[in-house]
Image (spheres, rainbow, N blue to C red):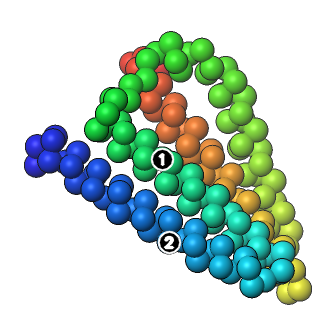
Amino acid sequence: MTQKEAQEVVVENMKKWQKIENGAIAICSSVLEKTDHPILRFVMETIIRDSQNHYNLQGMIVSSMTEKPMTIQPEDVMAVWDEIEKHNAMEKETVKLAQESLAALKDSKHLAAQKYLLEYLLIDEAKHDKMLENLEMIKNGLYPGN
């Protein structure tokens, strides 16, 4: 597959995916209209925000392949790298706190909702940690040997 063909596949898939994200937003919005339960509302509101973010990211991918190429320069990364490293350390600490909290509730039979919310937090914080690790791989690609 040529690079042009690969880009065409990605652009087509991103546009299809954006339609799916819009559908997810509609369904979650419908659920919100039918419930006042705080956990159900939290889950639906979170999915809506995530779907909106996904939609925007998919648009960014399409734009980078059809309008303006996306590049990252060494100075882009280095200008903010100290703060990124500080934030990454904080993310690692939040992952540890979530793991400790879940371990403390391991044998609790009556705190399923709290466990559910802590699992969500752990997954989300671990995702942030992974995003920052992957950003470091980009930085190291810009600066071989780092």
Residue furthest left in the image = 1
Residue at the spot 71% in from the left edge and 43% down from the top edge: 92
Q: Quadrant of residue 62?
A: top left
On the image, numbered disc 1 is attached to which residue?
57
- Who's the residue at 65% across and 79% down the image? 30
| Amino acid type of the residue that numbered disc 2 sits on in the rendered structure | Gly
Q: Answer with the quarter of the image where residue 12 lies.
A: bottom left
Q: Residue 116 location in percent, x, y? A: 75, 74
Number of labels in the image equals 2
Residue shown at 64% from the left, 52% from the top: 126
Q: Which mark is residue 3?
A: none
Left or right of 115? Residue 80 is left
Residue 21 shown left or right of residue 84 in the figure? left
**Kind of residue indicated by mark 1:** Leu
Return the residue nearer the eye: 30 or 6.
30
Q: Is residue 98 above or below residue 36?
A: above
In the image, residue 83 sits, relative to residue 28, either above or below, namely above
**In front here: 95 or 117?**
117
Q: Is residue 78 left or right of residue 62?
A: right
Image coords of residue 56 (percent x, y): 50, 48
Label 1 CA crowd tier, 10 Å (few <14, some 14–19, many 20+):
some
Mark 2, residue position: 23
Rendering coords of residue 77 (x, y %): 53, 20
Which residue is nearer to you in this view: 5 or 130? 5
Q: Is residue 141 visible?
A: no
Q: Is residue 91 above or below residue 117?
A: above
Say if residue 48 shows up in the picture. Answer: yes
The residue that appears at 55% across and 38% down in the rendered structure is 133
Label 1 vs label 2: CA separation? Answer: 16 Å
What secondary structure is marked by label 2?
A: helix
- Percent x, y of residue 110: 89, 86
| Element marked by disc 1 | helix
